[in-house]
Image (cartoon, coloured by chain):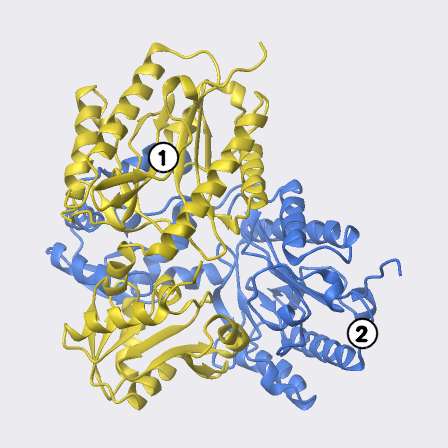
Chain colours: A blue, B yellow
Amino acid sequence: MSGPNYTQRRSRLIRAFKALELDGLLVTGESNIRYLTGFTGDSSWLFISSGATVLISDSRYTTQIANECSGLDVDIRDARKLIDDAAADVIRKAKTKHVGFEASHLSVAQHAALVTKVKTADLVATGGLTERLREVKDKWELEQIRAAVYMAERGIGVVRSSLQPDQTEREIRYILEAAMRSFGAAGTGFEPIVGVGPTAALPHAHAGDRRVSESSILLVDWGAATSSGYRSDITRTFITGKFTKQMRTVYETVLKAQQKAIAAIKPGAKCKAVDAIARKIIANAGFEKYFGHGLGHGFGLQIHESVRMSPLSEQELEPGMVVTVEPGIYLPGKFGVRIEDDILVTNDGHEVLTSVPREFDDAIVEFLA
Amino acid sequence: MSGPNYTQRRSRLIRAFKALELDGLLVTGESNIRYLTGFTGDSSWLFISSGATVLISDSRYTTQIANECSGLDVDIRDARKLIDDAAADVIRKAKTKHVGFEASHLSVAQHAALVTKVKTADLVATGGLTERLREVKDKWELEQIRAAVYMAERGIGVVRSSLQPDQTEREIRYILEAAMRSFGAAGTGFEPIVGVGPTAALPHAHAGDRRVSESSILLVDWGAATSSGYRSDITRTFITGKFTKQMRTVYETVLKAQQKAIAAIKPGAKCKAVDAIARKIIANAGFEKYFGHGLGHGFGLQIHESVRMSPLSEQELEPGMVVTVEPGIYLPGKFGVRIEDDILVTNDGHEVLTSVPREFDDAIVEFLA
């Protein structure tokens, strides 16, 4: 397995900003810098032009940069120099005149300070140039994401096989994290959500002290991260006791909404149209107001990246994009159900990367009575 | 132990922005919102004026907000509405005319979008209003930080008592994390750094596969987080085998620099002056170029907050501030030593909150030969 081709990625980025009549770009988004160089540190910026690629960092990172990005030019400052002063120097030396910056990754305050320092070039706002490249995953990235899916799926296997009624949400979270690590994960893709009953009705709950036995619903939303930084993102809702008719109806509605939305995923499909398919099925079942979030999102080096599968997204899916599809129904104070899989857009349709069973009968976990 | 007084915090903030002739403030920094309301979610903004306090969020958080911030007005949107549209509505309804925004917590892109939506008020950049309040910790916050120190110190006790030559950096990290959790931590204060030998020379290393036996130096930089979100931040460097004269010299130099800097901490002391004390001792010993970062930083809800103990910081210490003091010497490819403690500025000087032994002899860990 060969590694990522950083030079090619940067060449694509240069083409993109040249098309905007810029002769340089200051990259300040941490994941964008990692994508373009392999550098995993923080507090650093990347300057790119046709003639120069310079990582602007500080002496804490000298050795790490030599290891992670050998061959890259670096501008190392000590604790007495500010990063925007360093950036101004790099821009001046590169003789660039129209330099883009990432408007989503520079605060108003950082921008105001930078403008006073950079006297040899115009600074021009750009939006999502690197994010746009990152939307379509290359072969190496897909290998990383598949590995992150594997780690997560092995992890939930351990959780399920060791599940007991007296376990708390927090205990389950720790078992899951340790299991994913044992299968090679560098960490979690994000803070795992483990919710019993009413906690499962909070789409972004923290794992707490509720025990599995307190309800018949257990929701787990989890993912692994590889050492290369790529993530997976899956949700399953388990039935851990006697279930009501409503629980089954809600579960089957969410699953139907999810499966119909997944079926529509192919190159050219509009994100908002895929979202609408799931949203309509949930609305027709009478649960419209209990599904308040978007249908899904791209992921990779970050757990939420472009594209967004929301009612507001006009974007079209393309081969190589990887998105979650994760409708949910949340009944406040009672329970919630969400089912989430990771989907790769292929040349002629899609491939579901995740394989944990998701049918209602598969979700039932039986304990000794 | 009574909880935080959010109303009082918000009153102080209102006084601060009224002094700038603003009649409202849009708070977009996540930790600032938590500090002012107790809300622990993301993707939400807070609007404050004399007459209104409104948390602008979405339906994923309805129940969580009711639990965490009961009594607070909320503006809940669904997946079809953008947060800046919601904010514009809230600002219009509040009839405020001069509304501050947090220039460090709004990107250039977010600001540009917001300006087009808010038609009933001026938007004025503000800097660090809430951060300034957060610099000085109240009684309840100090209890939380002391708890986070306790959890971290119990955790390193487990690591040290179970240390073995064949353990890897990563294994030690996991033992430490599990131990802190067992003493009540909700999680780590940040990703723990565990570095053996050359890895200890990387100030921001990730725990990897090096084994303790590969060097005589083991650096651990770790902290706990309480469920209330407060952190601790400590570093110890252990001597795990035969040590060279240089190792001892470096260790003693760092310790002396740290202790002399701590001794200077009191109300009115300038941050850059405290930094200079440590930096001079390290320079006099010939290691100036191997100490590239600032001396320390404030912490609390975030692991790095205002104030900064750097050569560039003109700020003066005040009673109630809590800062790290963490000089280090890093010899690339060989080893690094850093010693870090958490210091509370008191009315007449300071209190060292951390108590893990730090003398050279205390740092020596002996294994069976």
- Horizontally, is B74 left or right of A218 in the view? left
- Horizontally, is B196 left or right of A215 in the view? left
Q: Nearer the viewer, residue A135 or B246?
A: B246
Residue B156 image label: none
| Residue A319 seen in this snapshot | yes
Q: Residue furthest left?
A: A119
Label 1 marks a residue whose chain is B
Q: Whole-percent x and y of residue A298?
A: 52, 65
Residue at point 73%, 61% (across, down)? A212
The residue labelled by disc 2 is A243
Residue at point 23%, 49% (across, down)? B319
Q: Whole-percent x and y of residue B298?
A: 30, 48
Q: Whole-percent x and y of residue A83?
A: 22, 48
- Horizontally, is B189 left or right of A152 in the view? left
- Horizontally, is B202 left or right of A148 in the view? left
The residue labelled by disc 1 is B203
| Residue A71 seen in this snapshot | no
- The quadrant of the image that shows the C terminus of chain B is top right
Circle 2: element type: loop
Q: Tell me the kind of residue under disc 2.
A: Phe
Circle 1: element type: loop
Q: Choose top left, top right, bottom left or bottom right for residue B125.
A: bottom left
Label 1 near label 2: C-beta < 8 Å?
Answer: no
- The quadrant of the image that shows the N terminus of chain B is bottom left
